[in-house]
Amino acid sequence: MTCLAARCAFVCLVLAVAAACHAAGSEAGRLPLAYRTANGAYPWTGRLFAIGWQDLTQAPSPDLWEAGDRLDRRTVPSRRIFTYAAPDGGSARAIPLQWDAVTEALHIGDNASVDWLRGDQTRPGLRPRDTRLANAAGARVRVVAPPAWSPGKAGHAGFRLRYSLRRHLAWHGTVDGLLHAFDAATGEERAAYLPGALLPYAIAMPAPGTPTVPPPCPRPEAQDVTLRGEWRTVLLCGVPANAAAGNPAAAFVLDVTDPDGQMPFVPIWEIAATNALPLAARGPVRAAGIRGPDGLRWFAVGIVDASPNDVVNVARAGLALLPLDKPAGAAWAGQYAIRTLPLPERDCLGGPAAGQLVAVSVLSDLTGAALAAYATDDAGQLWRFPLADARQAGANPATACLYRMRVSAQPAREEAPVLLGSPTAPLVIYGAGNELAAVPDGPATRSATARTPRQVTAEVADNGHILRATSGGAQDPGWRLTLPHAGEQLVEIEPVFPGYLLFVTRTPDGAQRSYLVLAATGESVAQRSTGERLLVATGQLLPPGASVFATRTELPGTPAQPGGTGRQAFALSVWAATGNAVTQIAQTLATRRTGRLRWREIVGPAREDAP
C-alpha cells in the first residue's frame, strides 16, 4: 500500500490483495483499506489517516484511526525510538534515541533537541508543533503483512507458518527523519527508526528556522529473503539527498521479521553516497536473489548516478547490487563488495546514454531467483538489466534499451515500472511525460526503434474517457497511451487483481483523475460473467484533495466442469476519500478463467526443503 503527496492531501492506492488481507488472519475486519496523509497546522507537521470499513455493503466510515492523535496520547518515555551507530570503528548497532546514548556513542546533540525528537513539547524556544507526527512530504505508506504463501521457494513454508500470525505494521517516514512502524489495526506506534545518515541533520531541526530533513524511506519496499541460510523479512529504504538540509543520499535495510520480539526491527546495514559510489535514492530500493554456486544470494538493488567529474574513473549511471548478507560492521569489500551494472554507451536512438535512471523493478521466477531488472530514465526510456548472470565479473553487455517514449519526456516522477505476466515474457508498464506504455519483453520482441505498439485512443464519455485500442496494421503486442488532458502526468500506478491497472494523474492546475484499465490492452473494459467485454468510461475527475483506492468483491461465478474450465467474477470498485466521506467513483466487472482447482500460473516443482 502506498501514498503520495499532494498540496493538501495525498493520493493513495491499494493493491487488490489488501481486500483479501482485510478478510483473513488474526486481525480480520480491522485492517485499513488505504491510508491518507494531510498537512498539519505547521508546514513540518502532518496527519496519517487509516481508511476502511468492516462491511462493504454498509455506508463507509472513512477514518479508522489517525496516527498523530495516537502519538499525542503517548507519554514520551513510552516511545521506542532507535537510531544507528557504529562508534569508533566498533560493530554497528541500533541504540535508543536518548540524549545520554546519542551523546556517548556519537558525540553530537543536546538534551533539548533529542527530547524534542522524542516528542517532548514542553521545551521553550524550539520549533512549535500541533502534533508529534511530522509531515510526510511525499513519503508513502508500506504495510508489511505476515509472509505470503510462496510455492517454489525452498524452506519458505516453515518460515511462513512460524510468522503467520504476526501483526501487520504500516511503515511511514516523516520530515523529522523518523521512520514510524504503526500497528495497522490500531494506529499505535510500535517503534520508530532514525537512520544514522539523517541523525546529525535531525538533531539540528528542532531549532526554529532550520531546514527539515527528507523523510527516510519515501518508497518503502519489503521482501522475504534468505540471510545466512535463514528466511527473514526485510524493509529496504532509500534516503533522498536534500540540498537545504545538506544530507547525502543513503540506503539502509531493516530486518522486520519479528515485530513482537525484544527488538521490533534490527538494522542490517546503512550506506551513504560518495563520489566513488554516487547512490541515488530515487524510486524504491529492490531486493534480488541471484543464483550462485551455493544457491540464491540476496542483494539490494539501487540506482547510481554518473560519477562526478572529479572522480578519476568516471562511470555511467546504472544499478548497484549491495549484498544483504554483509554484517553491519564489515567493510564493503571482498565477498561483500558492491557490484555495479552501468548503462551501455548508446541509448535507444543510438546516441550517448547520458540520462539518469529514475526507478527500477526486479523480475523474479517462482523460486525467487532474479531474472532481470527494468529501469526507466529521465529521457522516457526503458532499460533491461539481465540479473541471471550478474554474478559474473565485469560489465554486463546484454543490458539493452527496450523502448523510448514518442513524446518529449518531461521530468519523470519516481514511479517504478509495473511487471505483469510470466517470467519468460513479462509486460513492462511505465509512464513518462504525458504518456504510458506497456512494453512486452519476450524472445520474439524486436528492437526498441522498430517497436510499434498499439495506440490507445481516448474518447470523451460520461464525465471521463473511453480508452479504446486501435485495430489493424502491423503492430507489436503491448500498447501506448497519450493522456488526454494538456500537461497531464502520471502520479501513481498499481496493479489491481485480476489483470487491471489503477493509475492516478495530475494536470498543472492540480486536478487529479483516476483510470482503471485492462493491463493487457490499456482499454477501459468491463467483462461480463460470460467473458464478453464492454468498453466503459474511466478517467473521472476526483474531488479536490481526495485519496484514491480500489476494493475487490468476488461475485457468483461459473464452476469448472469436468475436462473444462470455470470462471471467477469480481466487482472492482474505485473509491475517493476526502476528509469526511468516501465516494464510489467507478466500478468495473472483471472475470478470469480458472482450472479445476482454481489455481493458475503455478509452475512446479514446488520445493519445500531447506533453503
Image (cartoon, helix red, strand yellow):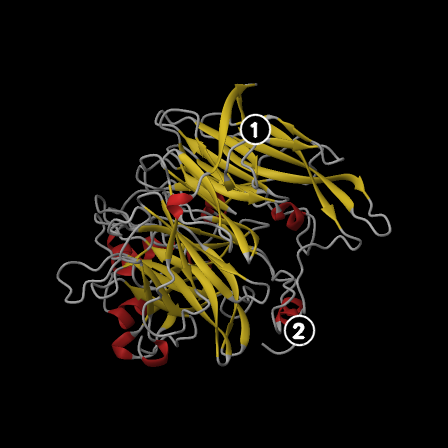
Which residue is nearer to you in this view: 57 or 590? 590
- In the displayed structure image, the side of residue 256 where residue 398 appears, left or right: left
> How many callouts does the rendering have?
2
Q: Which residue is drawn at the image coordinates 51% and 27% (left, top)?
A: 539
- Residue 433 can be seen, yes or no: yes
Outermost residue, right direction?
Answer: 562
Q: Residues within 10 Å of mark 2 (few under 14, many from 20)?
A: some
Q: Amino acid at mark 2?
A: Glu
Q: Which residue is mark 2?
A: 608
The dot on residue 581 is 1
Q: Amino acid at mark 1?
A: Ala
Q: Which residue is drawn at the image coordinates 78% and 55% (left, top)?
A: 597
Q: Position of residue 519 (x, y in %)?
A: 56, 41
Q: CA distance from mark 1 to mark 2?
A: 46 Å
Which residue is nearer to you in this view: 299 or 182? 299
On screen, 411 above or below 506?
A: below
